[in-house]
Amino acid sequence: MIPCQRHLFDVPREVAYLNCAYMSPLLHEAVAAGQAGLARKARPWTIKPADFFSESERARGLFARLLGTDAEAIALVPAASYGLAVAAANLPLAAGQRILLLADQFPSNVYPWRELAKARQAEIVTVPRPATGRWSDAVLAALDERVAITALPHCHWADGSLLDLAAIGGACRAAGSALVLDVTQSLGALPLDLATVQPDFLVCAGYKWLLGPYSLGYLYVAPQHRAGRPLEENWIARAGSDDFTRLIDYQDAYPPGARRFDVGERSNPALLPASIAALSQLLAWRVEAIATTLTAYTALIAERAAALGLRPMPAAQRAGHFLGIRFPAAMPPGLPERLAAEQVHVSLRGDSLRVTPHLYNDAADLDRLIEVLAKAL
């Protein structure tokens, strides 16, 4: 268990922020690093050509360590949707084949597949929410040789429903289906065994569980796809781009690994330092320890919510850092607004009250949530 780390964040004592799945606060250190980067941009004569590469490579390497791979596998992207578009542009799909999705999946992991299916005359197959709550069984039942692409999260964004990616990854390989993962709602708070799952592509936005800034995320590309086609052709994603005196010696070759998929203007002087600070702190805490701590938090909230007559998702069906709470009847009108008025911040997603704490929370925050819920019922 990691003790409360509130002192590292700008979260006032009177605020119970239990909404990391919406957007995480930034660490004080990340804010300072981002501000220092902006100050450097105010004095551009202090920025050297080497700076365009050093911070990008440091961030790439830190994310690779967090994921359990090497820097050659990682591209820097501005959003999960960008990484998913890279995947859609580089995976084969024939007419009549299928793309497998979950019901009510986050839109960024739906729209690119709809467009690809339309362009290739393929079919979208949406796995309905199972009455048992066991998504993995439903996905495995739908996976067969007709499925060319399986695009999933690690846990459902609305309520934290967990998928067994190890079993699904094995089934995808057996069926010949590419596996594309959006782990924006899990990576950094939920361990992932990359070597076992073996996705073809994996994307993660940085502003939630990676505790980073908006508009910077990361894309993992499996070795067999690293010679693929990038979404854009920018100067920095070509071989030899570190020599500014020879940029007009145009190159057909790309840099090694997944760097060809990097977004243009990746060397953002504010975003990269902030992300580096956040990734460094996550690695220092260790994802396994973060997961253990947050699992204890959500277990306590679930127990106390059940005592109020609410229906928290069972621990066996959800990710430990994520808790969806449903109501026996209709949700009280205006409940999220009533909670926010009491400085208790959670989200409503579908029919689920989504409660997602992090290490800046403590027992007092959990007490506040339960007290306000009790008054609202």
Image (cartoon, rainbow, N blue to C red):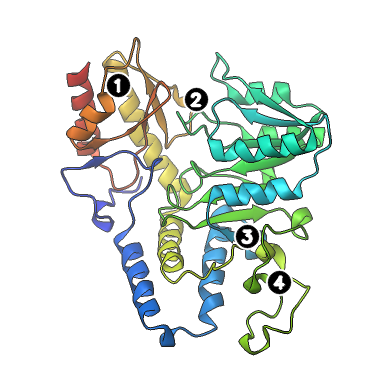
Above or below, 166 relative to 48: above
Q: Which of marks 3 and 1 is in front?
A: 3
Mark 4: few/some/many CA within 10 Å (<14, 14-19, 20+): some
Label 3 crowd (10 A; few <14 / some 14-19 / many >=20): many
Q: Position of residue 337 (x, y in %)?
A: 24, 30
> In whole angstroms, how far apart are the C-alphas of marks 3 and 2?
32 Å
Name above or below for residue 150 compared with residue 210. Answer: above
Q: Which of marks 4 and 3 is nearer the N terminus?
A: 3
Q: Name the residue under label 1.
A: 305
Label 4, on which residue?
Answer: 255
Residue farthest along the front direction in this orientation? 119
Alpha carbon of mark 2 to alpha carbon of mark 1: how far? 17 Å
Give the residue at mark 3.
74
Q: Nearer the viewer, mark 2 or mark 4?
A: 4
- Label number found at residue 316: 2
For marks 2 and 4 on the same chain, the one whose residue lies earlier in the sequence: 4
The answer for how far apart the CA atoms under marks 4 and 1 are is 52 Å
For the residue carrying disc 2, how many other residues have a C-alpha within 10 Å: few (<14), some (14-19), or many (20+)?
Answer: few
Residue 106 in the image: above or below residue 58 = above
Residue drawn at x 25%, y 51% as measured from the top left: 6
Q: How far apart are marks 4 and 3 (CA)?
A: 12 Å
Q: In this view, does 146 lie to the left or right of 330?
A: right
Q: Is any part of residue 72 visible from this angle?
A: no
Disc with the residue nearer the chain's start (3 vs 2): 3
Q: Distance between the residues labelled 2 and 4?
A: 44 Å
Q: Nearer the viewer, residue 141 or 108?
A: 108
Q: Do the residues labelled 4 and 3 touch (CB within 8 Å)?
A: no
- Where in the figure is residue 297, as x and y percent of width and height? 33, 35
Query: Reading the chain from its start, which is encountered first: label 3 or label 1?
Result: 3
Q: Which amino acid does label 2 sit on?
A: Ala
**Quadrant (top left, top right, bottom left, bottom right) of the C terminus:** top left
